[in-house]
Amino acid sequence: MKLEEESKKLVVINTHKGLFQYNRLPFGVSSAPAVFQQTMEEMLSGVPEFGVYLDDIIVTGPTEVAHLQNLRQVHASLTIRAVTGTGNPPSPSPEFHFVPVPEIPRPRNLNLSPSPKFPVPGIPNAPSPLQP
C-alpha cells in the first residue's frame, strides 16, 4: 500500500547510511494490519459470500456455478486495482476449478482407553512452590 507524502515523513528508518523514508506501508507500523484489513474489505465489498482476513480471502457459494461466479467477482475486483502478490499484472482470464472435498472418515473403535487424571504420579504429591 503506497504511502501519501505526509505519511512518508512519519515512517522513517535509520540505517548506517542515514535516514530513509518508506514508500509503502511497512509491517512494523502498529496500525498497518487494521489499515490493510479495512482496505481489503472495501475492495471486495460488492462480492457476495466471501470472508477476508488480511491477505487470506475465502470465497464460497451455495452451488458450484455460484461459487465460480463469486471467484470471478473477487478476481475482477482485485484486477481493477491491479492487486497481485507477485508484482506482475493479474491474468486476464483466470481458470478456476471446483474440487469437492471428500468427507473425512471418523475413526472407529480404536481401543483407546481414557487417560489417567494425573499421568505423572509425582505431580499430585509435589510440594507447593509457595511453601517455606
Image (cartoon, rainbow, N blue to C red):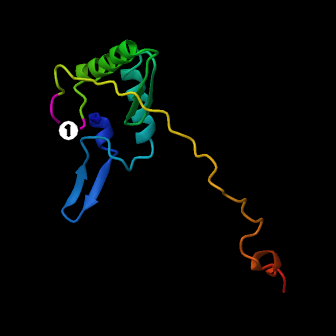
Task: Kindly identify the residue that appears in the image at 44 percent across and 32 percent down.
Answer: 102
Q: Is residue 80 above or below residue 116?
A: above
Q: Position of 80 compared to 62: left or right?
A: left
The span shown in magenta is 85-89
Q: Name the chief secondary structure element in magenta.
A: loop
Task: Kindly identify the residue that appears in the image at 72 percent across and 75 percent down.
Answer: 120
Quadrant the C terminus occupies: bottom right
Quadrant the N terminus occupies: top left
Q: Is residue 88 above or below residue 120?
A: above
Residue 127 image point, x, y percent? 81, 82
Task: Kindly identify the residue that appears in the image at 22 percent across and 23 percent down.
Answer: 95
Q: Residues within 10 Å of mark 1 (few under 14, many from 20)?
A: few
Q: Residue furthest bottom?
A: 132
Q: Position of 107 compared to 79: left or right?
A: right
Q: Nearer the viewer, residue 12 or 77?
A: 77
Q: Is residue 106 above or below residue 47?
A: below
Q: Is residue 72 above or below residue 127?
A: above
Q: Check disc 1 and report the residue beneath it.
A: 86
- Please name the amino acid that badge 1 sits on: Thr
Quarter location, residue 52: top left
Residue 124 image point, x, y percent? 81, 74
Q: Element type at marker 1?
A: loop
Residue 80 part of the magenta-drawn span: no
Residue 58 image point, x, y percent? 42, 29
Q: Nearer the viewer, residue 122 or 89?
A: 122
Q: Nearer the viewer, residue 52 or 35?
A: 52
Q: Position of 109 compared to 104: left or right?
A: right
Task: Kindly identify the residue that appears in the image at 29 percent across and 41 percent down.
Answer: 8
Quarter location, residue 19: bottom left
Residue 36 image point, x, y percent? 39, 34
Q: Position of 121 compared to 84: left or right?
A: right
